[in-house]
Image (spheres, rainbow, N blue to C red):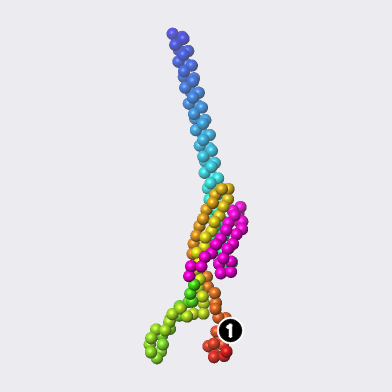
Amino acid sequence: MIKNRNGFVTIEILVAMVIGFLAIIMLTTSIKTVQKVGIQQELYQDLYISVLSIKNIIRAKGCIDNPTLSGEINGFKYSIKCREVKAQKNYIDMLNPITFKDEGGNKGIFMIYLFRVDINIQKFGLDKSYSFYQSEEKRLISEEDLLKIRLGIF
């Protein structure tokens, strides 16, 4: 009878050790997963901030003068390509006072450009691409020349 009891105790101890070992493995795996998620969350947070900063750089430098840019920000390497989608003069609404015909159209003094901006950003094997549209304007006639035209001075 005592031998039977010793056998059950040994089996109980082995089962308890297996359960304890599995609990330690699951705890270790959970901790590693939480650490990985934290690192990825920090990486994507830095990525978001970096993309917004790059967008501000593009707006400041302009696609007209800088169609391609590259550099590094917050540890991310980036490259930017601006492609012109469309360009046209601004619209002027004009009605002829004699004929009452609409003579308006894209005849303004500004050229308005629409660019597609492609951003490629990389860090630690993470390679992401983003794109958005940006419009820019460029004055075709200076203020002084416009005043001369209106006054009839050439």
Q: Residue at x 58, y 56 (%)?
A: 78
Between 19 and 2, the one nearer to me in the picture: 19
* Identity of the residue furthest to the top in this view: 1
For image coordinates 53% across by 48% down, the residue present is 41
Relative depth, front residue between 102 and 40: 102
Give, as a single range, the part of the protein colored magenta.
Answer: 63-86
Whether residue 69 appears in this view of the structure is yes
Query: Is 60 displayed left or right of 91 in the figure?
Result: right
Q: Residue at x 54, y 51 (%)?
A: 127
Q: Is residue 68 above or below residue 4?
A: below
Q: Is residue 102 left or right of residue 45?
A: left
The amino acid beneath tag 1 is: Glu
Verify whether residue 126 appears in magenta: no
Looking at the figure, which quarter contains the C terminus? bottom right
Majority secondary structure in the magenta region: strand
153, above or below 90, in the image: below
- Residue 31 at x, y = what percent? 53, 37
- Number of numbered discs: 1
> Could you say where residue 46 lies in the image, as x and y percent from the top left?
56, 52
Q: Residues within 10 Å of mark 1 (few under 14, many from 20)?
A: few
Circle 1 — which element? helix
Identify the residue at image location x=54%, y=56%. 120
Q: Which residue is mark 1?
A: 144
Quarter holding the N terminus?
Answer: top left
Q: Is residue 21 above or below residue 123?
A: above
- Relative vertical location of residue 68 with respect to residue 14 in this rendering, above or below: below
Q: Position of residue 29 (x, y in %)?
A: 51, 35
Q: Is residue 71 magenta?
A: yes
Q: Is residue 60 visible?
A: no
Residue 140 position, x and y percent, is 54, 78
